[in-house]
Amino acid sequence: MHAPALIACLLLIQLLVAEGSVEPPERRPHAQAEARQESREPRRQQVQFDASRFDSLTATALRSILDRAAAQGLPTAPLINRALEGAARRASGPKILAVVRVHAAALAEAREALGDRSTSQELDAGATAIGAGIDPGVLAAIRETRGPGQAITPLVVMTDLVRRGVPSLTARDAVTSIAIMPTSDEALLGLQLTVAKNAQRGPGMALDALNRYVRLTVPGARPPSTPATLDRKPVRPPPS
Amino acid sequence: MPCALASIAWGVPLVAQPRGAAPVAPAATIGPVTDAPTLSVLGLAGRAGDALVQRNDVWIGATQPVGQLGRVRVTAIANGDWKVRDAVGAEAAAEGMVALRARARVGQQRVWTAVSYGRSSFTGRGLGGLLPEEPLALGGVDLRGADTTVSRRVDLGSTGRAEAGVIRAFGAVEFSVGFSVERTSRVTSQTLTIDEPGFPVPVGGSSRLVSTTTTRSLQRRDLATGMASLGFQTGPTMWLVSVTSPVASWVTSDALAPMPGVIPTVASLAVVQPITQWLSVVGAAASNPATVGGTALRDAAQSAERRAFSPVVALGIRIDRLPFRGSGDGTPGGILAFESRTLGAVDSLSVEQGMSTSDSDTLRVVLLVDAPRAETVELMGDATAWTVTPMRRVLGGKWRVELKLAPGAHRVIVRADGGRWIAPPGVPIGNDDYGTPVGVIVVKGTR
């Protein structure tokens, strides 16, 4: 081999080796996890981790959490968004880290309940539901009504109902009974809106509104719980 | 900067009163610079010579929204300053002012105006001894014994004022400029006790002549003042910087009255640091104390306030929600709470989903927030990388922003007039990891 060709080969090999030794940002674990997640769902807007939004200690700790989540195959975009939310709300570094850690754990729980084929948005919605105190078993029940990628609205509505004071199991029954209907996303959002409006009127009104909505929306459905006001006859006081 | 404006504007009345300096931040800015129900109590200190000394001033200010007429919101403001008498013969002063302030939007321009009326009283020694401290001998007699003193002086003053200005926001900083005209009058009653040796001067005798004379004089000053201010927020801390400067003044005074001093340009800085949701610590400083306490027209003969730079500082508390306030929409005085704002509530948020954009993975989504009472509405969320995004006012009291969103759930929060970030009413509630919940909007895919 001629010397110039040999030198060129050596330079090429050195370049390749050097490139492999420095891991580019996009090959970091959480970036790879994002790529894997994207392969299972339509391309979504990228969420970049902007370290400049945090102090250096928090940013370093966040990177560590993101890498660990990515290594577990969890989506990192919801975690980054939670961190950015904390920064925007001027939360302290430890608070941001605590929120992100808890959400990462909830994402893992949600994946266990919803299945590996769930999209990152579903996992995020499921983790939010778990954060609201909803049992992972309820998530599994919702998954039974909807295929992968289709459970976002039921999960979001479920979380909202529980946050507005509807008991978890009652909300589950209402959501699952509507979720199996065709074009049920609109019906679910209607349920959420009805409950939200009535929840402002006082205790029990949210539950009452939910029962009425389910009875009117789902043909032949039994309300998840006894109505608080309807179908209730006045009780005559006993004769003295 | 509405807040700045408000503060200035409001402060000016005080400024005008104590002729000799412009509005002092403590008095002028802190209390009445918000339309939200607040009560502020401040103690003042000023520099005398090289030392910072207690002024024995207590300043109290209160604001209360009165109501709304169309797009015009009216707020009642009251403040008072009480200079406590700290020794016999020392000065004591009290003054109070009430104002009605209205704010409105004219097209895209925010404007404000206010009318105010105040009364003040001053009791004290007033003018000091007229003879020099050095021995002054005449015919072997020290004439310092022949002193003429003002044994008592009472001032009653009143101020009427009208002001107006515009407010404009540049990013997170609000800027305001305004103009005011006022008329201040003061009636000064001086009781002079003249105590002099009898003439011819007795040697070793005790012949003295004592007479008492009461004079009454009227002064009036018309003053035009320009004001500018800006307000911003760093974290929960609110800042207000303001400058007021006399443009023109006309003084009418009879010969017996002390000459009013000249109001200098006064710069002030006020800081409000929330401690709890309803309690804040307030600190303020101004380059001249002329507007705090004292008479309606401060005398030129009074030394310290005569200088253009004679700093004064104030420290106190502000209570943001008076107990009698029905909490209403719960939107607190926010980013620029100094300002005369009644925060608009966000009534609802609706989503108008548009067509796919060219890359076919995102959709043009229009978010409409119904907040007819608000003057600014901002939004942030997942779609904006949690950076504050201003919304644009459209017809019908709605606010609009267009985003490119992928199908799915997106968390979002909004705020009106720099108030607290809230989940848009009506949309599903998501997490509340940081204290207040976020809203979730669901964007449906096109397939």
Image (spheres, grey):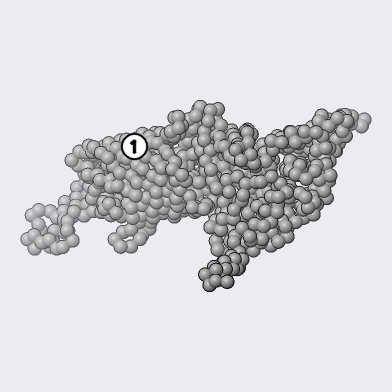
**Residue at 80%, 42% in the rendered image:** A146
Residue lying farthest to the front in this orientation: A2
Q: Report which quarter residue A150 is drawn in.
A: top right
Q: Please indicate whether residue B129 sits to the left or right of residue A14 in the image.
A: left
Q: Report which quarter residue B207 is drawn in.
A: bottom left
Considering depth in this image, is A47 or A197 the residue closer to the camera?
Answer: A47
Considering depth in this image, is A31 or A211 the residue closer to the camera?
Answer: A31
**Residue at 34%, 49% in the rendered image:** B267
- Residue B153, can we see it? no
Question: In the rendering, at what x and y percent does residue B87 appear?
Answer: 35, 56
Kind of residue indicated by mark 1 = Phe
Q: Chain of mark 1?
A: B
**Residue at 49%, 32% in the rendered image:** B73
Disc 1 packing (10 Å; few <14; some 14–19; many ≥20) = many
Q: Quadrant of the C terminus of chain B?
A: top right
Considering depth in this image, is B62 or A45 the residue closer to the camera?
Answer: A45
Which residue is tagged 1?
Answer: B179
Question: In the rendering, at what x and y percent does residue B298 appear?
Answer: 28, 46
Considering depth in this image, is A22 or B440 the residue closer to the camera?
Answer: A22
Query: For the residue labelled by badge 1, is the local secondary structure a helix, a strand or a loop?
Result: strand
